[in-house]
Image: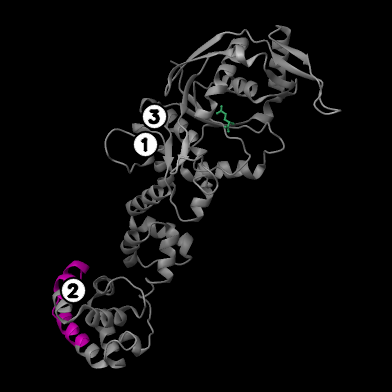
Amino acid sequence: MPKVVTRFAPSPTGNLNVGGIRAGIFAYLFARHNGGKFIVRIEDTDKERSKKEFEDNIFESLAWLGIDIDATYRQSKHAARYEELLRKLIAEDKIYVAKEEPKEPDGRSEVIRFRNPNKIISFFDAVHGQIEFDTTELKDFIIAKSFTEPLFHFAVVVDDWDEGVTHVVRGEDHISNTPRQILIQEALGVPRPKYAHLPLIVSSDRSKLSKRKGAVAITEYKKLGYVPEAILNYDSFLGWHPAGEKEIYSKEELITEFTLDRVQKSPAMFDETKLLWFNHEHLKKLSDSEYAARLKEFAQKDVDPRLVPLLKEHAKTLKEAAKALEDEFDFLGGIAYKPEFLLQGGKITAEVASNHLKTLSEILQNIPDEGFTPAQLKDILWPYATDQGRGEVLWPLRVALSGREKSPDPFTLCSILGKAETLERIAQALQKL
Ligand code: GLU
């Protein structure tokens, strides 16, 4: 068996989006699972629509996702090779120059057509099984506009052959191209690769993916504070999943598990909410120091290590975490608030608030430092708050500790601040009253 070689062949006509990368991810996982090679081929034969910025975006996205590439090709560099093979085929009379009625006054009057043997092509697809197709209906299709302008099907066949591609893993929209490409392979006398056509990706209302629904660039998700681990994991599940219930997989685990026989035929549903869930799960799996390092790119300042476990639980994206850091989690430095704020704008009297804060301070004095965990503090303070009225007890406490309208709950605040700082902040609040 030759070594497995797969390719991802994007056209650089737009930013790489979460739907478009799926074929690349599957081809990559399959190659790595089999100890094979993964190549990327930029299909830039459409000169008008192909742009350098999109090509850069494709490579930036692949690198960010951790998809390592063994070789890179660019179709625009293969013009001489295409011409050589077109001339060979014409010499063998397998293709011919055909006169055309020009569509416009000075339009082209010649194209190169394939001499169709009009036969049944039958091929095995790893996802769809045996497929048969009568090529008669394709007639003598156009294979190139001229010797220097091959069409897509010809370029794909030549490249797959020259690049040693053993498995063509691509979207289902290419199934109908396959018989034409096989005919060209047979005319050139080159081996037929194995095929796996991946199911369509639809949005949750079953419509096609669009800019608004699912076809969002990977680099856009990066800016929104998604982590590459989550995109890779979620995308891998668009039409495939391993045995069992487990959903959160690292790249290495995906490589270990990935086989084509577990790719489904039916359309895969792209669900933004599920992607967000994957992101949250992967964020929670990062070590605290790794989390802090990634958050720094969004928050532009160091995050206090005490806050990391809390942010991990609270925020589904790094952007959300950065916002929380500016907002309700900004209580570790000095705090400033007006005394009335302790009274919830007059709902609580100063006397009541003072009494509760004094009692809370006494209770907290008696808890050892090790007891300052949110769970233990809640166990101890909750019965008192329930008995006296939760709002009247917990509001002044929360404000005394955070000085903020919104913050984590008071038990969490006590635990993060620690015993000494908690008691100090309560004492300061009592002075204000
Ligand atoms: N360039 C084609 C596309 O972007 C892929 C061709 C192929 O995988 O054979 O859809």
**Residue name at image x 86 percent, y 28 percent:** 105
Is 9 in the magenta? no
**Helix, strand or loop status at disc 3:** loop
Gap in angstroms between the C-alphas marked 1 and 3: 13 Å
Position of residue 424 measured from the top left corner of the image (x, y, whole percent):
27, 84
Position of residue 149 measured from the top left corner of the image (x, y, whole percent):
73, 25
Which corner quadrant holds the C terminus? bottom left
Up the image or down, 182 lies above or below 388; here it is above
| Magenta region | 356-381
Q: Residues within 10 Å of mark 2 (few under 14, many from 20)?
A: few
Question: Which residue in the protein does label 1 denote?
Answer: 254
Which mark is nearer the camera, 3 or 2? 3
- Can residue 368 be seen from the camera position used here? no
**Helix, strand or loop status at disc 2:** helix
Which mark is nearer the camera, 1 or 3? 3
Question: Which residue in the protein does label 2 denote?
Answer: 369
Question: Which residue in the protein does label 3 denote?
Answer: 263
Could you tell me the amino acid type at mark 1?
A: Leu
